[in-house]
Amino acid sequence: MEKFRSSRSRPICIGRVNPVSTLVLPNTSSTFGSGCHGTDVAEATSVRISPVRSAPGGSGESTPGGGQPDTGSPVLANQDMVLGLSVPTRRLPNGASPQTGSPVASGRHDNTSSPRTVEAMGLASEGARFIDAGLPTEVVETILNSRAPSTRKLYSYKWNLFSTWCRQNDTDPVHSSISFVLRFLQEKFSEGLSPSTLKVYVAAISAYHAPLEGDSSVGRDPLVTRFLRGTLRLRPPVRTRVPAWDLAVVLQGLAEAPFEPLEEVPEKFLTLKTIFLLAITSLKRTGDLQALSVAPSYLEFAPGMVKAFLHARPGYVPKVPTNVPGPIVLQAFYPPPFGNSDQEKLNLLCPVRALDAYVHRAALWRKSDQLFVCYGSPKKGGPASKQRMSKWVVEAISLAYEAAGQPSPLNVRAHTTRGMAASKALMSGISIDDICDAAGWSCQHTFIRFYNLDVGSTPGSSVLSS
């Protein structure tokens, strides 16, 4: 009976099953709930049965209650049996397998599934481990929420790939040996995956895999550790020190059409300009910008619009929670009154000015207190995701290049704004400690190794410019 699925708008039918002459249902009460039907589908009076075809090997027509039932058939219902809309639903019993889709009365198949369903199914293995250890369900749920939703989704995806590979090799993924894990990692490494990607696979497998001897995890196994170290030597990461785009060109484009005049530009260009200026002046990740709010206690402008203070929403945990994150403080860039026309033009790049214009304009379509909301249909006014905001930053760079009369750069990522802004700040005389505090890096080594770019002038160019 697990093939039953509930439907609010139409009856339910069971397709692709062999007919039987008689169907017996227990006359027990059902509890209302959501999900698929369990064994107790409905009371006998709630089931309508259409004319039944003869069972294979039967003697023609049959009516409910008449004839001899085919007790040897494993099938439960006739293909034409339809349940009425008034049938109460039941939750799946423990151990029942959820159905990803079932035929509906119109003949179409409902095979849609939400990402949350896939994520929940992927986390079942890890949660089951904790439940088997005797932890209550509420405790397990809290433990699983220690990871960010994006991390849980990524781990679930990697684990599903490993599980599929194990089933193809007739191995239980939860209790697979280290040799099988290493064989899988070697196969992925031979396909060209980078050592950093293999580390994600190891982390995902460690999250779902059963503990090894001595309660050790897969990620801490000596062979796995040496394997990852070997991949780094065989395929060392290549980090470019040359930026993929020029900040001066982008700023020049943002000060011209179609990004100006700011009070008249479409919502799209106002949003792109604001998010880029905030990313480049705050040195923050896209996730940090997503956590900002327009609530009165989380967004404040100083008198004269000389500064803006932006606080993250309650409960937000940054990627590197080394200390309590402070507010983002934006300093106005050449605010009025202007001494000359050059200062007035430079004010076009003021992040406080762009933020003020965006907040007032977005209030017309805003449906969320998140700072950055979608400006286009069908999610206009809803909170923007990190992926969408990253695309906005890249699009702002591309359109600014076009506005400046230059071809758009290739291979641009939104994350490069952190390295570009930090490198420019270091060149202008800002201390490394202040840069690391603003960007949220735990130590100077992170900036020097991964984000420091060659954006300054060389002695040779200084000689030629003289």
Image (cartoon, rainbow, N blue to C red):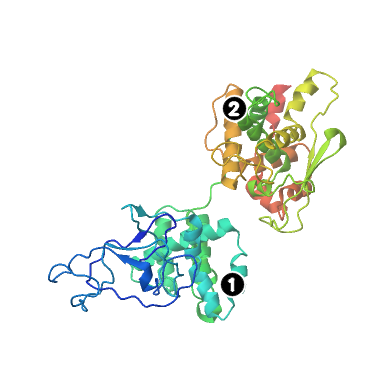
Residue 243 visible in rendering: no
Looking at the picture, tell me which residue is in the foreground, 200 or 126. Answer: 126
Residue kind at label 2, given as amino acid type: Tyr
Q: Position of residue 421 (x, y in %)?
A: 69, 39
- Judge whether 98 appears above or below 448 on screen: below
Query: Which residue does the image show at 44% across and 74% down from the upper left?
Result: 93
Lateral position of residue 84 relative to residue 68, left or right: right
Looking at the rendered image, the disc whose residue lies closer to the viewer, 2 or 1, is 1
Give the structural element (helix, strand or loop) at label 2. Answer: helix
Q: Residues within 10 Å of mark 1 (few under 14, many from 20)?
A: some
Find residue 229 and report its horizontal and vertical position in percent.
52, 62
Q: Residue at x 46, y 65 (%)?
A: 35
- In the structure shown, which secondary structural element does the residue marked by tag 1 occupy? helix
Residue at 21 percent across and 70 percent down: it is: 63
Instruction: Give the quadrant of residue 176.
Output: bottom left
Q: Which residue is mark 2?
A: 401
In the rendered image, which quarter contains the C terminus?
top right
Q: Nearer the viewer, residue 139 or 419?
A: 139
**Image position of 136 (left or right of 1):** right
Q: Amino acid at mark 1?
A: Val
Residue 322, position as x, y percentages in the image: 73, 59
Query: Whole-Å distance between the Cαs marked 2 and 1?
Result: 50 Å
| Circle 2 residues within 10 Å: few <14, some 14–19, many ≥20 | many
Left or right of 15, for residue 449: right
Q: Nearer the viewer, residue 456 or 191?
A: 191
The tag earlier along the polypeptide, 2 or 1, is 1
Label drawn at residue 319: none
Query: Which mark is on residue 140?
Result: 1
Q: Quadrant of the N terminus?
A: bottom left
Rendering coords of residue 342 (x, y %) = 78, 20
